[in-house]
């Protein structure tokens, strides 16, 4: 085995770059076999003493280097695997380099690559250095001017950042376009696209009256699928003006849809490149969830124009400065566009099933990491989702008015700069006139804090006491944690009526009923509430006010009361989830012991009351009726047992379906209407609830219910209901399963995004032969190893199938590893991210631990392991 030496980058070693890059002029001559890139940099040394010029650069052929038009000889510079160094340079000079690229061979999808006949770039985090030698650091800002030359028939559309300043025809069948971006930016925000694309266009008038052209570029065959994305962009722009006072700054805002893309989308200044999954949609081809996701991702990338582009990161350790803040902004946008309560529930569910396990695993790191080997490995749930929760806590602690003032101050102070998390927190502290030093521990300490809360009631004084203890488990490199500063939003309910009670802290004047903010900043704090005639029921962590695990000894009847009467949507949902989770875990214990399973009658009745309630928000009702996922339940077990969890959860599903069969049928029928589907018809919640009822019923696998499912599929006018019928069918061993899967494929085989759904549905099947089925699908003509969406749709989806991926014989682990070994040489970045399911091996029994470790060791033994993959495997196998 040949082992590469991989350097660890430490935040403490940061030093500013020695030169300023006043401007960069790029010329791309795009060819079918070879692409030439000419770069002219205007450089100035920051100091008086001459220092060597060190440029980042790899994976290209360097043809020439010149300083002030004087060509350098081979002895005048040194080239290594990662850098180009010129030992002696003037204090002010022009540097010209010419590099040769082969974008058609670039399977990494990083830098400049060609896919499906289109040239495309992805430069975040460090892709620009594979295009041309450059100080590829986020704190090096420059004004970019880009000229693109290409065959005018094959590539009629030539795009880059900024405003189009020149274009024309060339005598050799080629043409050119020159783009100028007046806003200095780091190289990771550079973008280029060349292809045969059609343009959809709208006009947008900003709050100051400027006209902006909104442009969406996509393939001709997809022309009819872009309307929702453009509409979402206009909504996001207007919302950002109204809510955060941020106005767009260029003449046009362009989006390009790309089929081959490692990420969801990229916020390149003025030219966003999107994974086509988050652009293309029609009612026939996309679900309600797809439409919501497109709106959210479109918003996210647009909001980056200020929180990431106009104000960017000093170094990659500050990544959450832009990503956490922008995720918070897109969450608020989606909450305003949809159901705020349901949006918060979905965000918390995602956090708990992705980020909490990350915090408890070998890749645990603070929101601002202290070191990394490969920065692409730190585009994590911690940086994004937990980072957004940190921003949310700041808003709660400061209040909405001061928070907005803090954001305005931050953008005003640092417009056009590359800054740090300290700069952001300082603006918030100044606006709110608060000491936030302890709060910054959220950026420096890893792990998920736990709040352990106990209570007592003294009838003689009418005093209710809450004792709150906070702790945080050890994480790699951080055995001991200091107390966090966090907001605990809570309320008090009357145990008899469920009505809201005043929350009066000892020594204060009684307020009206409502929520109360408690600030926690010590390891243990006691809060006394007075004026209470009876012992109240506390409603804790309203709105999920902090990303913590909460331990309070609620009884089952307490949870039923909260689920039925609590006004905060999150707390209502959480009460039901906790009740269902405790019952399922008790049944899992009985399953492990070989005991007969029996579902509590009180739970069935509580579920029936919820199902048949007159709750007007049908989307919320669907969330309330959805049982905790197997993945989340596994996190609640000391040693995760996928078989026991699956067996217990499925028993609950089948029992509820059997006992409440008629109720499910009635609620489903009431939610289904004859009117044609429309994206914004306000009925997404009804469709969600109707399909949830069908999923419960299909667990019984009775022929009349299978026919009901079949009839829905063939009678549907939209993808939401088609998938709603097909999802439960794929886990049902019946002839209709194969029939409808085949019909679905025949109908949609030419739509890449829909066929991704087809692969995913089969990968997530609960049937015992799912491993074998996935192996057969790997040989299907439509499977593409090198396409990230297709690989994720089948292989990554299978790794989230808790019961089949964790098969006791290790076949699921082998399947994932076999495919990753094929993918690693092609796309190490995607491979490293998809290793995550194997890194959780410590959560399982000793047999599964050994099987998972063995697969990680197989990968570790590969020769010349890329640093992306090496870092994840190495950390996962360490004993500490």
Image (cartoon, rainbow, N blue to C red):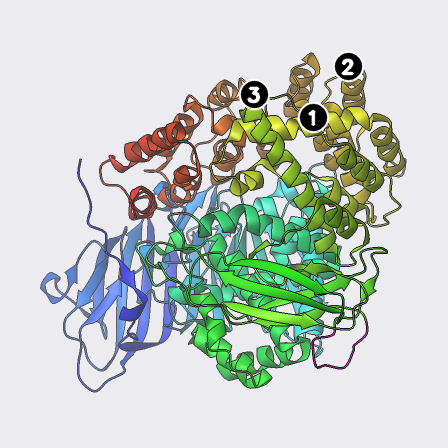
Q: Residue at x 31, y 30 (%)?
A: 854
Query: Mark 2 or mark 3, which has the lower sequence index?
Result: 3
Give percent across and percent down for residue 409.
56, 83
Residue highlighted by disc 2: 703
Residue highlighted by disc 3: 594
Distance from Cα at disc 1 to Cα at disc 3? 13 Å
Give percent across and percent down for residue 262.
46, 46
Q: Residue at x 89, y 46 (%)?
A: 614
Which quadrant, please, contains the N terminus? top left
What is the count of numbered marks?
3
Indicate left or right for 74 with 572 as reference.
Answer: left
Q: Is residue 753 magenta?
A: no
Please determine whether, in this image, residue 704 is positioned above or below residue 194: above
Quick one: 56 or 445, which is closer to the camera? 445
| Magenta residues (range) | 504-512
Query: Mark 1 or mark 2, which has the lower sequence index?
Result: 1
Please determine whether, in this image, residue 199 is positioned above or below residue 143: above
What SS does tag 1 mark? loop
Q: Please identify the dominant SS of the magenta region.
A: loop
Circle 2 crowding by C-alpha within 10 Å: few under 14, some 14–19, many from 20:
few
Q: Is residue 508 magenta?
A: yes
**Do the residues bearing badges 1 and 3 touch, measured as CB atoms within 8 Å?**
no
Residue highlighted by disc 1: 598
């Amino acid at each position: 085995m040949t082992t590469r030496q991989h350097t660890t980058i430490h935040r403490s070693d940061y030093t500013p770059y020695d030169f300023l890059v006043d401007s960069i002029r790029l010329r791309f001559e795009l060819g079918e076999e070879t692409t030439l890139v000419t770069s002219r940099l205007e450089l100035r040394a920051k100091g008086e003493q001459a220092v060597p010029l060190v440029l980042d650069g790899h994976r290209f052929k360097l043809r020439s280097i010149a300083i002030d038009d004087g060509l350098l000889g081979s002895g005048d510079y040194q080239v290594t695997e990662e850098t180009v160094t010129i030992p002696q340079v003037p204090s002010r000079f022009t540097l010209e380099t010419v590099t040769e690229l082969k974008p058609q061979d670039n399977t990494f999808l990083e830098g400049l690559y060609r896919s499906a006949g289109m040239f495309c770039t992805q430069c975040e985090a460090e892709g620009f250095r594979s295009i041309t030698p450059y100080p590829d650091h986020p704190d090096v800002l420059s004004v970019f001017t880009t000229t693109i030359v290409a065959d005018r028939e094959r590539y009629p559309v030539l795009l880059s950042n900024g405003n189009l300043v020149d274009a024309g025809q060339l005598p050799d069948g080629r043409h050119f376009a020159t783009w100028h971006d007046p806003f200095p930016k780091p190289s990771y925000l550079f973008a280029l696209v060349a292809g045969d694309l059609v343009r959809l266009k709208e006009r947008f008038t900003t709050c100051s009256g400027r006209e902006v052209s909104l442009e969406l570029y996509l393939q001709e065959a997809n022309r009819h699928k872009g309307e929702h994305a453009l509409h979402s962009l206009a909504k996001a722009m207007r919302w950002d003006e109204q809510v955060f006072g941020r106005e767009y700054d260029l003449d046009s805002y362009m989006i390009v849809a790309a089929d081959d893309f490692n990420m969801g989308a990229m916020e390149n200044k003025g030219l966003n490149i999107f994974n086509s999954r988050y652009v293309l949609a029609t009612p026939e081809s996309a679900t309600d969830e797809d439409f919501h996701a497109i709106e959210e991702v479109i918003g996210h990338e647009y909001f980056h124009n200020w929180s990431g582009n106009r104000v960017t990161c000093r170094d990659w350790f500050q990544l959450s400065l832009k990503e956490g803040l922008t995720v918070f902004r897109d969450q608020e946008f989606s909450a305003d566009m949809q159901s705020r309560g349901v949006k918060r529930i979905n965000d918390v569910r995602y956090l708990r099933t992705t980020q909490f396990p990350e915090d408890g695993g070998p890749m645990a790191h603070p929101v601002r990491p202290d070191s990394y080997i490969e920065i692409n490995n730190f585009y994590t749930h911690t940086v994004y989702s937990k980072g957004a929760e940190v921003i949310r806590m700041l808003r709660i602690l400061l209040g909405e008015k001061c928070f907005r003032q803090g954001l305005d101050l931050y953008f005003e102070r640092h417009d056009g700069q590359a800054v740090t998390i300290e700069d952001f927190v300082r603006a918030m502290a100044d606006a709110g006139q608060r000491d936030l030093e302890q709060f910054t521990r959220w950026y420096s300490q890893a792990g998920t804090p736990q709040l352990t809360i106990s209570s007592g009631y003294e009838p003689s004084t009418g005093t209710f006491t809450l004792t709150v203890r906070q702790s945080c488990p050890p994480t790699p490199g951080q055995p001991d944690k200091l107390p966090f500063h966090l907001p605990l939003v809570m309320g008090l309910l009357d145990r008899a009526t469920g009505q809201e009670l005043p929350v009066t802290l000892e020594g204060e004047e009684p307020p009206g009923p409502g929520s109360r903010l408690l600030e926690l900043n010590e390891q243990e704090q006691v809060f006394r509430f007075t004026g209470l005639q009876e012992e109240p029921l506390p409603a804790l962590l309203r709105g999920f006010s902090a990303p913590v695990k909460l331990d309070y000894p609620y009884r089952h009847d307490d949870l039923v009361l909260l689920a039925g009467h609590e006004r905060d949507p999150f707390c209502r949902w959480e009460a039901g989830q906790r009740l269902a989770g405790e019952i399922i875990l008790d049944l899992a214990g009985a399953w492990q012991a070989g005991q007969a399973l029996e579902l509590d009658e009180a739970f069935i009745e509580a579920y029936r009351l919820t199902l048949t309630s007159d709750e007007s928000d049908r989307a919320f009702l669907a969330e309330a009726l959805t049982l905790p996922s197997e993945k989340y339940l596994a996190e609640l077990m000391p040693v995760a047992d996928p078989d026991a969890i699956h067996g217990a959860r499925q028993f609950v599903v089948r029992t509820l379906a059997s006992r409440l069969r008629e109720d499910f049928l009635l609620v489903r029928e009431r939610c289904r209407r004859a009117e044609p589907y429309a994206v914004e018809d306000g009925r997404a919640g009804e469709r969600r609830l109707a399909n949830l009822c069908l999923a419960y019923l299909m667990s019984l696998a009775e022929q009349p219910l299978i026919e009901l499912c079949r009839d829905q599929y063939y009678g549907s006018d939209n993808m939401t209901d088609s998938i709603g019928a097909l999802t439960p069918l794929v886990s049902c061993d019946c002839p209709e399963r194969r029939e409808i899967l085949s019909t679905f494929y025949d109908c949609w085989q030419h739509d890449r995004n829909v066929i991704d759904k087809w692969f995913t549905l089969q990968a997530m099947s609960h049937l015992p032969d799912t491993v074998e089925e996935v192996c057969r699908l790997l040989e299907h003509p439509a499977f593409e190893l090198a396409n990230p969406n297709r690989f994720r749709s089948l292989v990554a989806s299978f790794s989230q199938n808790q019961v089949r991926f964790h098969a006791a014989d290790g076949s699921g682990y082998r399947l994932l590893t076999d495919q990753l070994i094929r993918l690693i040489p092609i796309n190490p970045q995607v491979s490293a991210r998809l290793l995550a399911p194997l890194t959780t091996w410590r959560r399982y029994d000793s047999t599964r631990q050994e099987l998972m470790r063995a697969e990680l060791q197989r990968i570790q033994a590969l020769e010349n392991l890329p640093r992306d993959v090496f870092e994840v495997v190495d950390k996962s196998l360490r004993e500490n």
